Amino acid sequence: MTHDTFERPFTPSGIQYLQAGDGDAGLLVFTHGWRDSALGWQWVIDELARSGAAAGWRVVSVQRKEVARRDEDTAGLLEDFASQVVEVVHHAKRPHERVVVVGQSMGGPVGELAAAQLPDLLAGLVLVTPAPLAGSPLPSDVVEAFKANGRELDRVTTALSRAQLAVSASDAVTLRFVISTPPETERASLQSLASWIGGHPLGRRQSSVTAPTLVVVTDDTFFPEEMLRTEVAGRFADSHVAEVRGAGHCPHLERPEAVAHVIAEFLTKL
């Protein structure tokens, strides 16, 4: 399965998503991180299909869309982005179909908020190197550096900057970063940035998601393992942690086969 085999439908309000697979096992929903795109998940989806782990599962990957909200309202931004995921789920799902949500980086808090809106459908939640829902306070100079990155609209330059978080950026990995980096406006980039830095007040309490939750940790130094175990996994009633070594912040681009493996194991246990 490659990006050329995806269907690319839109919801009535204009949220685009990629769609593939068939069967009645359930709907596997992917949501992406900052400066990433729905296409960033294609290699994990490909590995799941190749291994047979996704047999019977239908797959959608949501493309986040800019919203009309002030950057200061970070909770509202995350809720808007989560609503886009929920809208895609209701547009794509079949009656009585169970749903597993998978989110990476800022797609983690977005995925958690979306999952909380799907209690009767949700079978599981997977958070890959997720930003904490409570937010990620950063020193002012670091925030300014991120904003400068957010204003860079050249896709290749942005991709090379993202690839600096990789443990080992081979030519193949670097190409994945380039392919997955979307064309987007400065406004869209900066509001996504604001959302995961500022976070949501719900992140400071126990998660309302009670379905089995998998937190995937790596050798990432930006969101390190101990922080994810404490600030993310510790908030869920039924959480498990899986390790993917030899990858940094974007293991779905660095080691998609390993990410697909831990997702496959999680789906099998469900």
Image (spheres, grey):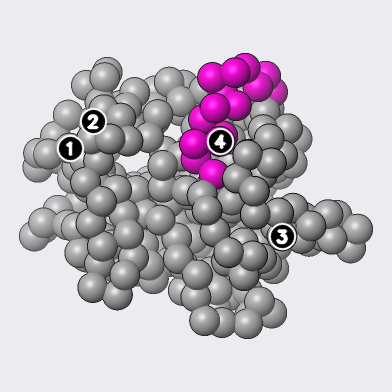
Q: Residue furthest front?
A: 154
Q: Which mark is residue 102?
A: none
- Residue shown at 9% from the left, 39% from the top: 23
What is the distance, in whole Å, between disc 4 and disc 3 at their CAs? Answer: 17 Å
Q: Up-down: is 139 above or below 37?
A: below
Per the image, the residue denoted by label 4 is: 178
| Amino acid type assigned to the residue bearing label 1 in the image | Gly
Give the crowd class for mark 2: few <14, some 14-19, many >=20 residues within 10 Å: many
Element assignment for label 3: helix
**123 or 155, which lies in front?**
155
| Amino acid type assigned to the residue bearing label 2 in the image | Ala
The image quadrant that residue 41 belongs to is top left
The reply to whether callout 2 and callout 1 are in contact (CB within 8 Å) is: yes
- From the viewer's perspective, tell me whether residue 183 is left or right of residue 19: right
Tag count: 4
Dot in front, 4 or 1: 4
What is the distance, in whole Å, between disc 3 and disc 2 at their CAs? Answer: 37 Å
